[in-house]
Image (cartoon, grey):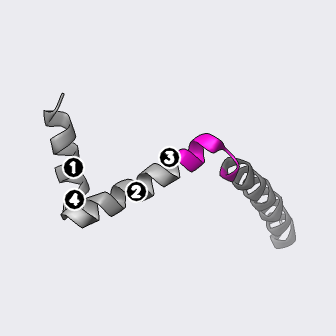
């Protein structure tokens, strides 16, 4: 495959991936998960807990 053909194929693949990313950004479920993740990280930071420590607390509550 020539360099130009490889370049064009990469362009097409990138365009498809960008379209997929835009579709994912519109998903309400993903937006909820992103908000949860941001809020959880802020909460862990405010209490000085690592992800491992927070997970250990959650697992011990079961």
Q: Earlier in the sequence, mark 3 or mark 4?
A: 3
* Labelled pair 1, 4 in contact (Cβ < 8 Å): yes
Q: Is residue 32 left or right of residue 57?
A: right
Q: Which residue in the structure is indicated by mark 3?
A: 33
- Seen from the viewer's position, the closer of residues 44 and 22 is 44
- 12 vs 23: above or below: below
Q: Secondary structure at mark 4?
A: loop
- Tag shown at residue 54: 1
The residue mark sitting in front, 2 or 4, is 2
- Measure the C-alpha gap from mark 3 to mark 2: 10 Å
Task: Look at 16% across and 43% down and name the residue there.
Answer: 56
What are the residue bounds of the magenta stretch? 25-32
Could you say where residue 8 lies in the image, as x and y percent from the top left?
Answer: 85, 65
| Rendered-image quadrant of the N terminus | bottom right
Q: Is residue 32 left or right of residue 62?
A: right
- Measure the C-alpha gap from mark 3 to mark 1: 17 Å
- Seen from the viewer's position, the closer of residues 11 and 26 is 26
Q: Which residue in the structure is indicated by mark 2?
A: 39
Q: Is residue 24 left or right of residue 57?
A: right
- 62 vs 32: above or below: above
Q: Quadrant of residue 9?
A: bottom right
> Is residue 44 at least partly visible in the picture?
yes
- Tag shown at residue 50: 4
Crowd around label 3: few <14 · some 14–19 · many ≥20 (10 Å): few
């Amino acid at each position: 495959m020539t360099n130009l053909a490889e370049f064009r194929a990469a362009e097409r693949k990138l365009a498809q991936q960008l379209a997929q990313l835009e579709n994912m950004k519109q998903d309400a479920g993903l937006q909820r998960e992103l908000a949860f993740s941001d809020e959880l990280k802020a909460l862990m930071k405010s209490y000085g807990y690592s992800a491992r420590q927070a997970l250990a607390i959650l697992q011990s509550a079961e």
